[in-house]
Amino acid sequence: MSLTQRMLDSAKAKADSKANARENITIAGAGPVGTLLAVILARHGHPVKLYESRPDSRIKSIYQGKSINIALSDRGWLALEAIGLDKVVKQQAIAMQKRVMHAVDGTITEQAYGTESQAIWSVSRAGINEQLLDLAEQEPLVEVKFDQRLVDVDFNNASASFMHEQNIEKVSADLLFGADGAYSKVRRLAQETPRFSYNQSYMPQSYIELHIPANEDGSFKMAKNALHIWPRKKFMLIALPNPDGSFTCTLFLDFQGEVSFASLTERADVEQFFETHFADAMPLLENPIDEFMEKTANPLFLVKVDPWAINEKVALIGDAAHAMVPFYGQGMNCGFEDCRELGQLIAEHHHDWSKIFPAYQAQRKINADAITELAKRNFVEMSELSGQASFLLQKKIEAEFHKRHPELWTPLYSMVTFSPHLPYSQALAIGDIQQEIIQQIMQIPNIESCWQDDFVYQKLLQLVHAVFNDKQKNLSINKQQQGQSHD
Amino acid sequence: MSLTQRMLDSAKAKADSKANARENITIAGAGPVGTLLAVILARHGHPVKLYESRPDSRIKSIYQGKSINIALSDRGWLALEAIGLDKVVKQQAIAMQKRVMHAVDGTITEQAYGTESQAIWSVSRAGINEQLLDLAEQEPLVEVKFDQRLVDVDFNNASASFMHEQNIEKVSADLLFGADGAYSKVRRLAQETPRFSYNQSYMPQSYIELHIPANEDGSFKMAKNALHIWPRKKFMLIALPNPDGSFTCTLFLDFQGEVSFASLTERADVEQFFETHFADAMPLLENPIDEFMEKTANPLFLVKVDPWAINEKVALIGDAAHAMVPFYGQGMNCGFEDCRELGQLIAEHHHDWSKIFPAYQAQRKINADAITELAKRNFVEMSELSGQASFLLQKKIEAEFHKRHPELWTPLYSMVTFSPHLPYSQALAIGDIQQEIIQQIMQIPNIESCWQDDFVYQKLLQLVHAVFNDKQKNLSINKQQQGQSHD
């Protein structure tokens, strides 16, 4: 070791020890993102108070028999690996290697998500949250409290007031994180601070959850290792498997309009609706008509804010910073990525929050914006395109080209889902270029019969080189592609 | 008159008389838009209560010596004509036929806004507001109340609570309009209603007002009939004339960053800033350093919402529905256009508000979105491009081509400002196509010396025909252009 190196190391050690009394941090919201964040911050030496407005689901059931599922993919796994929880979670997770599309006439088609070894994973939101809470409570620096409703935040000093059984406690801290989800109270309070840009936009669709029970012997009524879709263009039904042999289904349908939650109020109309569009699912679903009549449709909305960190004291993370629609299955994955990358920035900037917060916003907002956009676009892919032969063919051609030239082409879905080191923003940019190219390939006469011929892939290769040269992006794109092909 | 026609007329008269008891309407906000709206609604037979949170400026000065100016253009005049107030307002207005650009070295260049007979008009916001209030109070159906702070709105029945001297009055009505400006309370309360999409985004710039007094003899210190700009790329100073010989100036500057309101806190730095960038304005400005040091910079932000009308009971109008930045001088013009078109829709739909509100939103939101976008883009045009010779040349070429082929080309600025029957959204769309075309003309070698040659305009003509044919938009664009060339 050189003298210079030793001097640098010594200076660094001194700086680290000087900042030895780590900032106290309050986290509002002990959902999956807030709890993961608590573990990461504690392991960086920060005392953490993790406050949750709801009761502890491990003691008191708060889900009313509902099982909300989440599609966990490589970005989420990478974050769980970083805290050593991936193996525990995987025990309760079900791999979904493919989409299974159910046409109106009952015809079934399939589409692999990636290569044979790649899958997205169906996990229970409650389950993963409880596994994270168990871990957080083992951290000496983490204190978890439930039934604590956030009442107020002081954005100048990061203190927050929580109400518990009519008593209000003022919690002082050096920093506060709002990890309190799509309906974040921290964010709503932040709207009152100066120069806070805010965007909340509703999708035309709303949703309700439905249920397909297991067979009497506990086996699955449909293919287990798949995400099932009934694509009906303006609306769709999807189903994700649960470990008990059941499926949790979600019906996405316009909130108002000709065929919508608002128009379907008569029982006979609802029966007609299901019989017409979901005949093959009817024998599987448990009381869909009753469920439809009884349930209130949940809205879908996107949230964007700027800044993510206020006064270098209070920051938003996860859905609180970037609520998105569920059509790419990336909401929790993105929130977990927020936490993992924040942890890296803490190390990189030696706990200097005046550097960490700006870097956190600069690094994460562009990517959250990108996945929010991709998720919004993906409704059309799921509800409409996935039911079209030409779209499935396009995906096959992309998969084949990827196999031949993995360094030149990774399908967009794989970049988002299976390339956890490729930023979402780059996946979006590359995906848009790919789309231009593949559209030209789809114009080849009789492509549906000749798609496996070599000349198709030679043309694709030419187009890729031409576009990359033309746009003078050759180098950077190749670098990105290589970066993510090693994932 | 045919029998059928007579029967139709009779049916219409019956329908009209049936709805003879017109809906009672509350308007929150008696600024220029709310007051114009009150007059228009009253003239359509609606009893109107117009409530304003501030005192009556005609009795008690509320502007603290500030004179806020507004650039009134043809859309605004059209609305004022419709209520017969244009002549009164024009007596106090000053025509601005051109931009006058002041370079750093003091060089002055000019750019006409349109043809010789066209101008935008500098009016005092307080003055036009008071003229509108005088008119509104002459309407038998309008009741105006001041010092009434809006406290709450019931979006189900359009009742609103106003506080006056600590007393809260609940005002019942059939309909409520929120005309309460960029910081609208009605809109803030509407955010609590279900499925309300909301977007508020801050610009990097903020602003303060400065002042150039008249000469001792009451004459103007600079050219009177002009909007003066000191374009400095990242920031700029502008000045609008007042009838008393003074100019109201606005300094637009980044809120934070290297050169910004946040960085300029020391008096010496502020002096240096003005001396370096606005040397030629310094002898004209009244205490700019003191003003800069004392004043708090005002933020600039855009607001978009959806829906504009809630439960067919409460609607937003003017800045409350679409706050924009001031760089196109269209904020009040757009608000006035909202009112004028709403009046037309009331007549068209015979006071059937279940039809008026959806039509109002469909017709106005797309245009408010367009002018909001154009206004945002125009900062660059004002602060940077207007100081560039190539940009001024482009404007000259456009003006010349417009003179040769008025049916084919009207410059974007004129479409927005002098073509009040052309929707903003079409101006934006046509403007984008024009921009593509004119960029090609600017590539002609030595265009700065040959720009008056015929071949330039022949090429321009070819390009226009090619693009329009290519995009198969020939017919619709020509129609739009012809429509607005008659304005």
Image (cartoon, coloured by chain):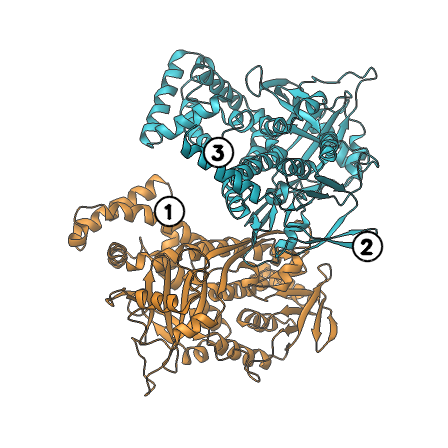
Chain colours: A cyan, B orange
Determine if residue B1 is in view. Answer: no
Residue sitting at the far top: A453
Drawn side of residue B156 relative to residue B349, left or right: right
User: Of helix, strand and loop, which one carries label 1?
Assistant: helix
Residue A167 is labelled as: 2
| Residue denoted by label 3 | A428
How far is mark 1 from mark 2, CA to CA? 70 Å
The reply to whether discs 1 and 2 touch (Cβ–Cβ < 8 Å) is no
The residue type indicated by label 2 comes to Asn
Of tags 2 and 3, which is closer to the observer? 2
The reply to whether discs 2 and 3 touch (Cβ–Cβ < 8 Å) is no
Q: How crowded is mark 1: few (under 14 residues within 10 Å), some or many (20 or more)?
A: few
Q: Quadrant of residue B342?
A: bottom right
Of tags 1 and 2, which is closer to the observer? 2
Question: What residue appears at the point 21 percent right and 51 percent down from the top-left corner?
Answer: B457
Determine if residue A342 is in view. Answer: yes
Q: Quadrant of residue B385?
A: bottom left
How far across and how far down the image is residue A152, in percent? 70, 55
The residue type indicated by label 1 comes to Leu
Drawn side of residue A315 relative to residue B158, left or right: left
Of tags 3 and 1, which is closer to the observer? 3
Residue sitting at the far front: A3
Q: Which of A27 and B464 is in front in this view?
A: A27
Does B36 appear above or below B399?
A: below
Question: What residue appears at the point 53 percent right and 26 percent down from the top-left corner?
Answer: A413
How far across and how far down the image is residue A112, in percent? 58, 18
User: Of helix, strand and loop, which one carries label 3?
Assistant: helix
User: Of helix, strand and loop, which one carries label 2?
Assistant: strand
| Residue denoted by label 1 | B475
